[in-house]
Amino acid sequence: MESSIAQAPNPAAKHTTDLSMSDFRAATALQWRHSVLTGEVSCVELTTMALTAAATMSDLGSFLHLDPEFALTRAEQQDRTLQTLRGASPDALAQRAPLVGLPTAFKDLVPVAGLPLTFGTLAAPAQLPAKDAPLARTVHQAGAVSIGKTQVPEFGLPCYSENQLAGPARNPLDISRTAGGSTGGGAAAVAAGILPIAPGNDGGGSVRIPAAACGLVGLKPGRGRIPDDDASASVRNLVTSGPIATIAEDAALLFDVMAEQRGFAVNAVQQARRHGLAPLTVGVTTESPFTPDLDVVLSEDALVALENGITALGRLGHHVKGTEDCTGPERFWTADYHRDFQILWTARLAELGFGEEQIQQMEPLTQYFVELASSRSTATTEAAVGRLQEFADSAEDIFGPWDVILTPMLASAPPEHGWFASLSPEQNYVEQCRFTPYSSVVNVLGLPAINVPVHTSEDGLSWSVQLIGKFGTEEHLLALAATIEQSLDR
């Protein structure tokens, strides 16, 4: 395996919107790590930089909770450990602690020892976990330093990060707009340069949606790929953990840690950037699984992004054609998806035993979901889950002769804060589906997918495409994303 050590950071204007402030967009995560390993910068300095930026940009709403004392104590411990290991080579240290010194933060749905856990709701008291969740433990053991907990929607249910506990997570590309959800606070922090990388989890698009809204790369691994996640093949197992980063190489760095492997994804990205990839067959579809129940309309910028993605793939030597060539007159996705997914998405809420007083403290949308789930018969729920399970059991059938499926990511620009919540709960959910018409079906199928920014509109917003791969192709998707980035930079 080739060395993954990168050169020391040099500020790059294209990754930095405010050159007067030192931030993590000035270099890649690998470059920042290299500076730590060579002693050019300390873990305490990087952690201080992140904490200062988070405090300075508190109006961005990225964080529900910051804990400088907690973070700086951990950073000091890491600096002491590094001092005792100074005789080791940077490569050896990187193998031992691949995220050493890099500040990060978990969304406030993930237990982190010593940091409050609220689930973004007033309906339950905040907890103070005594130990890390498995994923948080894995990321911390790799050397990352958590500086706090990031903003989320209530229980992670909506695709926008707003709740009653604090201000909304704002999009750094346009602070009047949502950063997406449910990893909205984490995505906003990375896009603003507060953090170099952020771990998220994705049950219906919660990594890809905010990453796309904020102009970042977000990878949803396949079901069971991350050792710390539930490995069940059940379609009820929608959630998987994935990385958010500015570029594919940084996402690969965090993915390697999450997948508990030694640099395979980073190596795949670096090899692809140097030597390219063997030609792939790529099928393109704009059909959403929510149709015909919902009328999904793609904005002009979403279509421009799709064309840019197709052009970049063609320029790279891949064979791109519409999926209608392999599906014929049949529907690409399963029938009745809109109804069945809503049943699946809300079913667990009926099992949690919320009291009436708790329900009254919830957001109107959550109340609506709880009422729907509680009023539904077990037979109705099981029938919907059964249909989706049958669909998931033959997930790779959608590929036909294609290696990868390409779709748009978001159908329209991220709305302004409060827009979704201003609607009736029923219409709120419908508009969320229209905004994110291609993400949740990948969770149902359990396949890996990545969003890749490919277009910046005249108003400065970022637009992405989504690449869906077969099981076990996460590294290949990251490598493909990196080559698209490289193609667009030329």
Image (tube, grey):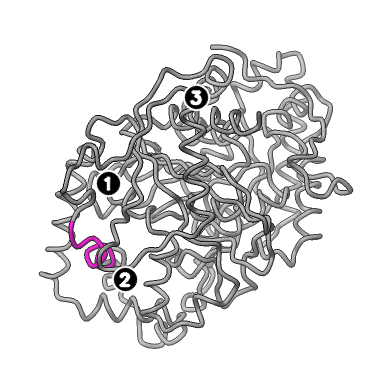
Q: Of the numbered discs in the image, which one, if any, rests on residue 316?
A: 3
Marks 2 and 3 sit apart, C-alpha to C-alpha, by 46 Å
For the residue pair 205 and 42, the one nearer the viewer reads as: 205
Q: Which residue type carries mark 1?
A: Leu
Q: Residue at x 24, y 78 (%)?
A: 374
Q: Is residue 92 left or right of residue 266?
A: right
- Of tags 2 and 3, the one toward the viewer is 3
The residue carrying pointer 1 sits among few (fewer than 14), some (14 to 19) or many (20 or more) residues within 10 Å by Cα, namely many
Q: Which of marks 1 and 2 is nearer the N terminus?
A: 2
Q: Is mark 2 on a helix, strand or loop?
A: helix
Q: Which residue is drawn at 19% across and 51% down?
A: 331
Marks 1 and 2 sit apart, C-alpha to C-alpha, by 21 Å
Q: Which residue type carries mark 3?
A: Leu
Q: Is residue 126 left or right of residue 285?
A: right
Q: Is mark 1 on a helix, strand or loop?
A: helix
Q: Residue 21, how many percent across, how many down?
A: 86, 48
Residue range corresponding to the magenta coloring: 335-343
Q: Which residue type carries mark 2?
A: Leu
Where is mark 2, residue-wise? 349
Where is mark 1, residue-wise? 445
For the residue pair 275 and 489, the one nearer the viewer reads as: 489
Q: Do the residues labelled 2 and 3 touch (CB within 8 Å)?
A: no
Q: Earlier in the sequence, mark 1 or mark 3?
A: 3
The residue carrying pointer 2 sits among few (fewer than 14), some (14 to 19) or many (20 or more) residues within 10 Å by Cα, namely some
Q: In this view, does 283 lie above or below 281?
A: below
Quarter placement of the C terminus? top right
Q: Is residue 424 left or right of residue 371?
A: right
